Amino acid sequence: MPATTISEVISQLDAIIQDAIKNSDRRGYFAALYKQVTVAVANKIKEGNFFEDNGRMEKLDVVFANRYLEAYNNYRNGKPCSASWQLSFEAAKTWKPLVIDHLMAGMNAHIGLDLGIAAATVAPGNAISNLKGDFDKINVVLNGLVNEVKAALFSMWPISKWIAGLHAGKIEDAIAGFSMTIARDAAWQVALAYAPLDTPAAKEEYITGRDKDVAAFGNKLLHPGAFFSTVMYIFRLFEFGTVAAKIKKLDK
């Protein structure tokens, strides 16, 4: 069932994480990261004075999360889901991608496709402009999680600090730069484009086109060409730990 509150979102994410740990399912990587973000947003809402409109932010968080939860459940039950999420979930079946690559694929689908749609759903038409301030404040919340996520990722190379050092720039750019700047800016443009649409046909057409573009970008992230694929493979050899252990590190 769709979540109706942030507490229900966190509960459903936790169920996905626990199932992923039990079954060594790499889809749990993104779920663990997403749970951290959701908890952080929930805490800011509880503070009462961080967001301009706490009720609206909870609604946005829930609508946003339900797009991921629906995609996850549809895929798990053999039902269609968006192409961008299909790509991310299919990648979880393979050994080669690094944890950071799985996180990137998930962020690409959720931020690149879902976030703008969710924002415009909560604030359709001209109301979208009033959401910008709170939308931007999400970046502040994400920024507070960067060091924790980086620490978890680095800990997966326990005897290869020099690899972590070489990889530091990539990880920081991937988590901080990608999710908090490029992707979120693009998501806001999606929100502005989607908000004025007032017919189901127009909305479906826009989502289909956007999904195609996001999936194409996700494919480049996971399959960056022969040279970078080889580099990724080498780094993957030094990424230690079971799938379950890695999920637990991200779910601290």
Image (cartoon, rainbow, N blue to C red):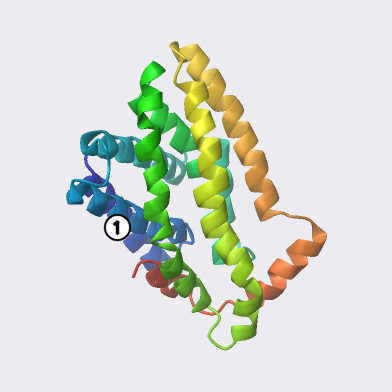
Q: Nearer the viewer, residue 23 or 231?
A: 231
Residue furthest to the bottom in view is 159
230 is higher (above) or lower (below) than 34: below
Residue drawn 48% across and 75% down? 242
Residue drawn 36% across and 42% down? 65
Whether residue 143 can be seen here: yes
Which residue, given by chain and number where applicable, does mark 1 sit on? 14
Label 1 environment density (alpha carbons within 10 Å; few <14, some 14–19, many ≥20): some
Residue furthest to the right in view is 226
Residue drawn 45% across and 56% down? 30
Corner quadrant of residue 118: top left
Q: Is residue 218 left or right of residue 55?
A: right
The quadrant of the image that shows the N terminus is: top left
Q: Could you say whether the residue bearing mark 1 is in a helix, strand or loop?
A: helix
Residue drawn 21% across and 46% down? 49
> Number of numbered discs present?
1
Corner quadrant of residue 55: top left
Q: Nearer the viewer, residue 199 or 23?
A: 199
Q: Position of residue 24 (x, y in %)?
A: 45, 67
65 is higher (above) or lower (below) than 122: below
Q: Is residue 67 left or right of residue 227?
A: left
Q: Position of residue 140 (x, y in %)?
A: 39, 52
The quadrant of the image that shows the C terminus is: bottom left
Q: Position of residue 169 (x, y in %)?
A: 62, 67
Q: Is residue 157 left or right of residue 54?
A: right
Whether residue 89 can be seen here: no
- Give, as a three-letter code, the residue at label 1: Asp
Q: Position of residue 9 (x, y in %)?
A: 28, 47
